[in-house]
Every structure is written in structure tokens, then in C-alpha cells.
Image (cartoon, grey):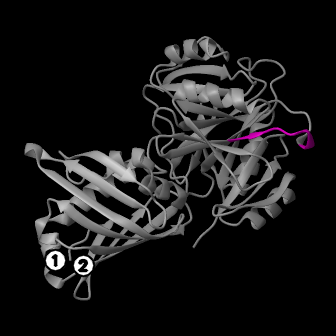
Amino acid sequence: MNSNSQLQVELQGDREIRITREFDAPRQLVWNALSKPEYLKRWLLGPPGWTMTQCEENQQVGGEFRYVWVGPDNMQMAMHGKYLEVVAPERIVRTESFDLGCAPQAGEQHCTLTLKEIGLKTLLRIIVKYPSKEARDATIASGMEKGIAASYDRLEGMICTKGFRKPGQFCWINMLTPQPDEARDFFGKVLQWTFFEMPGVGHGIRVAGKNIGGIFDIHSPQTPPGTPPHIGVMVKVENADAIKDRVNELGGKAQTPFDVFDAGRMVVCQDPAGGRFDVWEPKKMQGTEVDANEIGAPSWFELMSNETVVAAKFYSDLFGWTSEAVQGGPIPYTVFRQEAVAVAGMLQITPEMGSMPSNWATYFTVKNLDECQSLARELGGNICMTTKQAPGVGRFCGLVSPQGVYFYMMEFEHA
């Protein structure tokens, strides 16, 4: 069988086809996109010109599904089946039968899908068993590989963790520190960052040759007095001035937008609970395009809030994010999503955490958490949160640099 660098479709035995495809996204994200009708209707379309007009999905053992598509010249195709096994987010076994179109494929197919986690990437494997060799070969002859490739390319575009960030996603970080030279030395060693000079402004940060942010002197005239050392987060938007007005309408606070040379337009904002963030309308500078898998890359953003209900509504109304409660830990956790993509998390600040303002935290990818912790301590850093386990995700901890900058490190699980 033919294959390209991403999709492989191969014959297996007399009646089976094996399909493999790697996605630049975490397994849970791929699972969500394979499971929820609102996402399926956006990517499971086959070649250009087709739309999904019906998507009935009951993804549990014994549950049934039915998809209906309409293509060029009002051609129709429909498929239905029953779920035999569902193990989230790892495995699906189901039957598949076409009742409209695809006449050569008449009969029931048996489909087994597995998702294997490889860090922040996911390997999808599908084995489709046909009722006969003739049915299998007719499927191949129909050009099904092109339809599968187009659908999975579309899915990749929805959930990819690399490439320039889309509006509503975090696109840049700005570190403010009283000792920028010392900070470059510390983070360069711990997170393997490299730097480039931005004359008269500060230094840019690079990971794997890609720009991710900047380091600036907190004592500069542009910084309000009393600002603590921190890593600021920035969300890409299409219209900074409109966002400024919307922030104020929703009960937050937004300063006057300003141009950063010819790179873009920026607004400094604060949510109603006090969490500070910036927005960025790109001109010549789009923001980061780094792969979140890379060592030192920002891979997760987390809001610690004193008013999670208020904050959830604010960000949902401002950026169009949806919020989803996630179970499994002692503290309730919320995941913000933009379409299928998980863009950030949120948790409530508890009395046990002490008195602190609402704030955005940034997680950075590391290869070996224990080694990075040891190195950080040797260089004068301190552990402010001991190592925790996020089931199905990885191990993480919180640190503070010798310059007083708080940050998190994440070692993702590898299957």
C-alpha cells in the first residue's frame, strides 16, 4: 500500500486493513476529537466538498452511532454501528456498516481503534476487518485512503500543539525580573533556553530555535512600581481595541492598547478576580510557533483564582472558551477549551495555599523532572511545590528562581 510521512494504510491478512497516523497532540485531546459530535462534524468529512449532516453518537458499550454525509452533486453516504468495547482514552471496538453509498463495502466491518501516548504526541492505530477479501479490496480500490488522509489532516489542524497559535490561544510569555542577566543564566541551564538581544528592550527567549518570549528588567520605566517578579502570559486576538472594550464590559480592567513598534498591538488586562494577562494583536510578530513537546517550551497555562466561577464566565465570554470540570484530584479543576483544544486549566485558591492574588502560572516541558529539580536547587532555586502526579499526563512540580520568579516544570508520560 502507498503511504506518506503521516498516514500509513496497509493490507493485513486477507480481510484486514491497518491504518496508522501520528498526531502532534496529547492522547486525551485526540480522544475528545474522536468522541464528541461537535468535533466529529468538523473533521470527519473525507475529501473536500463533503459535509456531515447527521452525527448521532452514544459512545458506551452497547451504544450505537450513525453518521450521514452529503457530497458533490448531493451524493449521500451513511454509516452506522454498535460499540462493543470502550476504554477511554485508549481503545474503541465497534461494528461499522454502510447503509447509503459505498455499495461495494456491503456487510458489517469490525473496527478496533487504539491510541498510544508518546509524550505530547499520540499514535493512532486502526484495524478494520471486512466480511470478505473482495469487500476489503473494493474499499481500497474506491480511493478511501485519500478520504482518510484529508480527514486526519483536518483533525491535525484542529488539535496540533505546534505552529503559530490561533486567536484565543496563548502565544507568548514575558518574564519580568530584577536580575535579567542572572535569570538568563538560571533558566538557560535549567530549561535549556537560548537568548537573543532585543536592543533597548531586553532579551528574547528561544526553544529549539523558535522564539517563545522575552526577559525584561522589572526596574524599567515602563513597569508599574511594586510589580513582583513573574512570568506574564499573552493571548493572541484579532482586534486588541475591541478586546479592551470587552474586558471592561465583562467586569475586568484593561489599559489603553499600545503598539509595540511594528510587531503588534498589545493590551494589559486583569480579570474580575484579579488575574493578570495580556492580549496580542499580531502584525509582523505572530508569537510562538514552538512545538510544546520541545524541552523548555511552555506546554500548559493554569489560572489559580480566588473566584473560579466568576473567572470561568469571564474567559468564556471574552475568548469563546468552554469550561469543563475535571474530577480526580482533591481540589476541583477546570479545563478551558477552544473548540477541541485544551488551552488552559484553572483551580481554586484554598486556605491551605495561603493568601495570594489570582494569577496565571506557566508550565514548561522537561525531559527528566528529578534532574531539573536538582539542578535548579544547585543554582539557588527553591521547590515551592513538591512533585505531583497528574494521571495520564505526567509528573510536575513548582519552583521559584533565585530572582523570585515562580514557574512549573512538567515531565510528560511516555508510553
Which quadrant is home to the N terminus? Answer: bottom left
Q: Is residue 124 left or right of residue 153?
A: right
Res 365 seen here: yes
**Residue name at image x 27 percent, y 74 percent:** 109
Question: How busy is the neighbourhood of tag 1: few (under 14 within 10 Å), some, or many (20 plus)?
Answer: many
User: What distance separates the C-alpha of mark 2 from that of mark 1?
Assistant: 6 Å
Between residues 210 and 160, which one lies in front from this camera angle? 160
Q: Seen from this angle, which residue lies furthest front?
A: 62
x and y, in percent, of residue 262 in the image: 46, 21
Q: In terms of sequence position, does the residue under pointer 2 or pointer 1 come before the other?
A: 2
Q: Is residue 351 magenta?
A: yes
Above or below, 396 against 139 in this view is above
Write the start and end of the magenta stretch as one range. Answer: 346-352
User: Is mark 2 in CB contact (under 8 Å) with mark 1?
Assistant: yes
x and y, in percent, of residue 23 in the image: 43, 60
Q: Amino acid at mark 2?
A: Tyr
Say which residue label 2 marks.
130
- Displayed quadrant of residue 51: top left
Q: Is residue 337 left or right of residue 306?
A: left
Q: Amino acid at mark 1?
A: Ala
x and y, in percent, of residue 400 in the image: 83, 46
Say which residue label 1 marks.
135
Q: Is residue 227 left or right of residue 24?
A: right
Which quadrant is home to the C terminus? Answer: bottom right
Q: Is residue 42 magenta?
A: no
Q: Is residue 62 left or right of residue 52?
A: right
Total numbered labels: 2
**Residue name at image x 18 percent, y 55 percent:** 77
**Residue name at image x 56 percent, y 64 percent:** 119
Q: Secondary structure at mark 1?
A: helix
